[in-house]
Image (cartoon, coloured by chain):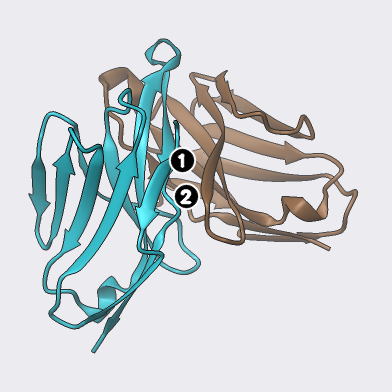
Chain colours: A cyan, B brown
Amino acid sequence: QQQVKQSPQSLIVQKGGISIINCAYENTAFDYFPWYQQFPGKGPALLIAIRPDVSEKKEGRFTISFNKSAKQFSLHIMDSQPGDSATYFCAASIRGYGGATNKLIFGTGTLLAVQP
Amino acid sequence: DTAVSQTPKYLVTQMGNDKSIKCEQNLGHDTMYWYKQDSKKFLKIMFSYNNKELIINETVPNRFSPKSPDKAHLNLHINSLELGDSAVYFCASSQVITGSYEQYFGPGTRLTVT
């Protein structure tokens, strides 16, 4: 129940196209849903995040769509660029342990390749 | 200014050895984490510390012992290294007391056990 399922495993998009990555979860206790971008040899970098009381959040070319009833959320990258080629991870967080920490449960990652 | 830093970047060692990875954050955060990324890139939490106190231990073998000397530092010591310990280890931090959920990751330490 603490899993986050992510698809597709890999994605090839043409420059200027839209990249869409999907995630699904089961645990309704999750209350924060971030997306991370990871380049080879680097640490995951926080890209954009959403709370379950919001259905959509947009930051530049990146948009999260959130469907609470379906327990799904997705990342849309508009006007995809070769520089967006990276591995993208969705995650879900549980605040617990008396509020002393929040644990991130990660999806399995999507390797995005944007072709010029 | 590096927000979350780790040393070393690479660590190659033989089975049975003991090694340590160090992490420092200059963000003033109160909570720090260790995550493990395996060869398939799957990221999984190992430990979480809040104000130097261990909060999460995700059924990690007791060969792994984290230590937090102060809020800005979280080290990971691994005894009797095994081949299966080969992975990239990431340190992260967040400011939980303000209600923030944002976690910031370090550059990672690639551990190779031969």
**Residue B104 bears which disc, if any?**
none
Which quadrant is home to the C terminus of chain B?
bottom right
> Residue A64, how many percent across, how many down?
16, 49
Residue topped by disc 1: B92
Q: Percent position (x, y) of residue A4? A: 40, 42
Let me know if marks 1 and 2 both belong to one chain.
yes
Q: Which residue is mark 2?
A: B106
Give the amino acid at mark 2.
Gly
Residue that appears at 19% across and 33% down: A51
Query: What residue sits 71% from the left and 56% below the top?
Result: B86
Q: Above or below — where is B31 with respect to B6? A: above
Q: Between residues A30 and A50, which one lies in front from this camera angle?
A: A30
Residue B90 position in % (x across, y down): 54, 48
Residue furthest to the bottom in view is A116
Closer-to-camera residue (A48/A25): A25
Q: Is residue A36 left or right of residue B73?
A: left
